[in-house]
Amino acid sequence: DAGVIQSPRHEVTEMGQEVTLRCKPISGHDYLFWYRQTMMRGLELLIYFNNNVPIDDSGMPEDRFSAKMPNASFSTLKIQPSEPRDSAVYFCASSLSSGVYEQYFGPGTRLTVT
Amino acid sequence: DQQVKQNSPSLSVQEGRISILNCDYTNSMFDYFLWYKKYPAEGPTFLISISSIKDKNEDGRFTVFLNKSAKHLSLHIVPSQPGDSAVYFCAATGTYKYIFGTGTRLKVLA
C-alpha cells in the first residue's frame, strides 16, 4: 500500500487567496483526520470523518476553514481567505475502526502564507 | 487548555545511554496512550502504545511506562542510537480522537 497521500507537499500563497489541501487515505480505512502542526501548539486535531461523515470539527479554527470528504478515497481541507497565521504543516491521517487506535499519517503539506 | 503536556522541548543524550521522554495528561477519561516519532519532512509514525489497564509495555529498545495515579507516562529508549534523533509526540485518547503533546526533540550524540 502507498500509505496516506497528500498534495501538494509545499504551498506558498499570498494572504487572501484560497488554498486547497488534498488527501487520499489508505484504502479500507474508514476514519480520516486533519491535523495542523505549529511550534507553539504541536499537533492539533482540526476535524475527523468516519465513513465520509464529519464527526467532530471542534478543532477547526474559524469559518475560513472547511473540510469535505466526498468519497472514501479523497478529502480536502480548504482555507478561504488564507492569512499569514495559517502558515503551518497540515497532516492528514487515516485509521481503521477495528478497535486498534493507530493512525497512519501522510507526509504533510507545508503551507506558507505571505 | 493543554490536556497532554510534554514539558521538555528538547533532550540530548549520548549514544548508548538511556533516553527518557516524559508526558503528563490531565483527563482521567483517557484510556489509551501512544508515542509517535517524527523525522523532518515526514509525517509522524507510530512507535509504541499502552492501554490504561497496563503499567508497562516493551518493544525491543523501547519501553513505555504508565503511572495512572500521577497521570504520567514516559518513554525509555535503551540503548539510544543516532537514528533515534527525531521529535517524539505522546498522544492520549478515549475514543478515536487523539490529543497530542507539543513534542520533544531528541538528539542522540555519537
Image (spheres, coloured by chain):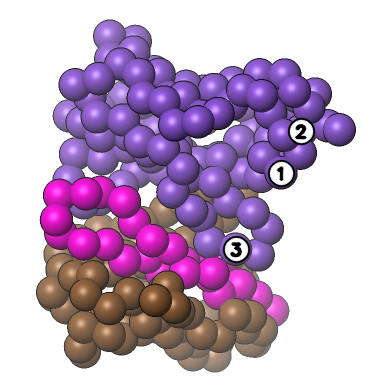
Which of discs 3 and 1 lies nearer the camera? The answer is 1
Question: Where does label 2 land, which residue?
Answer: B108
**In front: B107, or B47?**
B47
Residue at 31% in and 24% down:
B26
In the image, the segment drawn in magenta is A89-114
* Magenta highlight on residue B50: no
Q: CA distance from mark 3 to mark 2?
A: 19 Å
Q: Amino acid at mark 2?
A: Val
In the image, residue B104 sits, relative to residue B41, either above or below, namely: above
Answer with mark 3 or mark 2, whichever residue precedes in sequence. 3
Answer with mark 3 or mark 1, whichever residue precedes in sequence. 3
Tell me the brown chain: A
Q: Is residue A57 left or right of residue A51?
A: right
Identify the chain of the residue marked 3, using the numbered disc in the image. B
User: Where residue A74 sits in the image (x, y, percent)?
Assistant: 31, 86
**In front: A45, or B106?**
B106
Q: Residue furthest front?
A: B60
Question: Where does label 3 land, which residue?
Answer: B42
Tell whether label 2 touches label 1 (CB within 8 Å). Answer: yes
Q: Is residue B27 something one can see in this rendering?
A: yes
